[in-house]
Image (cartoon, rainbow, N blue to C red):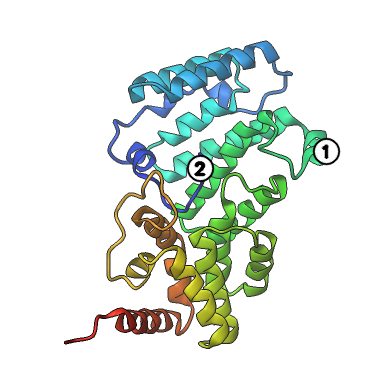
């Protein structure tokens, strides 16, 4: 999961909707309780190797069977729980399994590890199953509309991983804006001020509009955002409907980039009084300037 956004990509969403529904009772109940015994490191390593095979499996059934086998090898195999959560029937069910996965991952890493390695997570290989579980929690909470806990978990992940390898800032920034926490949003933006993604530039433009209103400062920020992605306003202005499933990949400035950006920021733009009208007016003026003169 390289980048997490508050909507499932097509492949992951299908796991909740179109795929055959796996029987979650296949997960052994003992494996879903926190363990008291110290993990067998050799068994855990072997179990993780099975997870790599599960991720490459041709079918859902094969993937789940390998995950179950990994759990039998080591109930500390957090990524096995993550796989079962990925294929849960509902977001509530997935959330429960991701939460259990995160609890087991935290127990395995230990409190001292969290204290000594805070900020460097993800860069340390052993943290990644836990981080994937926490990102899954964010995704489920987003789908369930629990904005307060989305913010809480995003902040926790950013504290653990300063480099934000899982892209929590792209969820957190528009959510903070939507909820009127502009000071926190501004601090988050400044923390990653060197981010040259379209989403970050559109977030900057919206923050400037909320602070300064329409004018030189916000207009300049919006022009910079439009220079990176000219397609996003079609979705932000709802002139083009967002697809049911988000693209699995994108390049800056392309249609997929615009879709992912709008999916995460649309509510924040709509919640900012006058922002949609400002964006629409700016785009209309821009189009008028570029229209060829009549002969």
Mark 2 element type: helix
Q: Which mark is residue 95?
A: 2
Is 274 situated above or below 51?
below
* Among numbered discs 1 and 2, the one appearing first in the sequence: 2
> Which one is in front, 289 or 215?
289
Q: Position of residue 21 (x, y in %)?
A: 32, 32
Q: Nearer the viewer, residue 252 or 109?
A: 252
In the figure, residue 277 lies in which quadrant?
A: bottom left
Label 1: few (<14), some or many (≥20) within 10 Å? few
Residue 77 in sight from this viewpoint: yes
Q: Is residue 40 visible?
A: no
Q: Position of residue 147 (x, y in %)?
A: 54, 60
Percent across and percent down for residue 76 are 63, 23
**Residue found 57% across the figure and 82% down from its top:** 217
The residue that mark 1 highlights is: 116
Mark 1 element type: helix
Q: Position of residue 229 (x, y in %)?
A: 42, 63
Can you tell which of label 1 and label 2 is closer to the viewer? 1
């Amino acid at each position: 999961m390289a980048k997490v956004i508050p909507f499932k990509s097509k492949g992951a969403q299908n796991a909740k909707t179109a795929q055959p529904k796996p029987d979650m009772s296949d997960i052994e109940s003992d494996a879903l309780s926190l363990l008291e015994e110290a993990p067998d490191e050799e068994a855990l390593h072997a179990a993780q190797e099975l997870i790599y095979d599960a991720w490459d499996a041709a079918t859902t059934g094969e993937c789940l069977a390998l995950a179950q086998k990994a759990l039998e090898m080591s109930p500390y195999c957090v990524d096995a729980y993550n796989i079962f959560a990925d294929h849960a029937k509902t977001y509530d069910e997935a959330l429960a399994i991701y939460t259990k996965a995160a609890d087991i991952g935290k127990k395995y890493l230990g409190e001292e590890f969290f204290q000594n390695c805070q900020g460097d997570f993800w860069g340390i290989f052993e943290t990644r199953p836990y981080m994937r579980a926490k990102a899954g929690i964010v995704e489920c909470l987003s789908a369930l509309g629990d904005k307060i806990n989305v913010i809480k978990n995003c902040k926790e992940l950013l504290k653990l991983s300063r480099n934000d390898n899982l892209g929590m800032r792209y969820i957190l920034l528009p959510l903070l804006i939507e909820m009127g926490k502009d000071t926190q949003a501004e601090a988050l933006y400044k923390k990653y001020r060197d981010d040259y993604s379209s989403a970050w530039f559109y977030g900057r433009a919206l923050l400037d509009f909320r602070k300064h209103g329409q004018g030189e400062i916000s207009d300049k920020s919006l022009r910079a955002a439009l220079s990176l992605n000219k397609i996003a306003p079609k979705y932000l202005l709802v002139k083009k409907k967002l697809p049911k499933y988000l693209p699995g990949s994108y390049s800056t400035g392309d249609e997929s980039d615009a879709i992912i950006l709008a999916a995460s920021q649309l509510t924040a733009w709509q919640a900012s009084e006058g922002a949609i009208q400002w964006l629409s007016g700016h785009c209309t003026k821009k189009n008028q300037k570029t229209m060829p003169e009549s002969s």
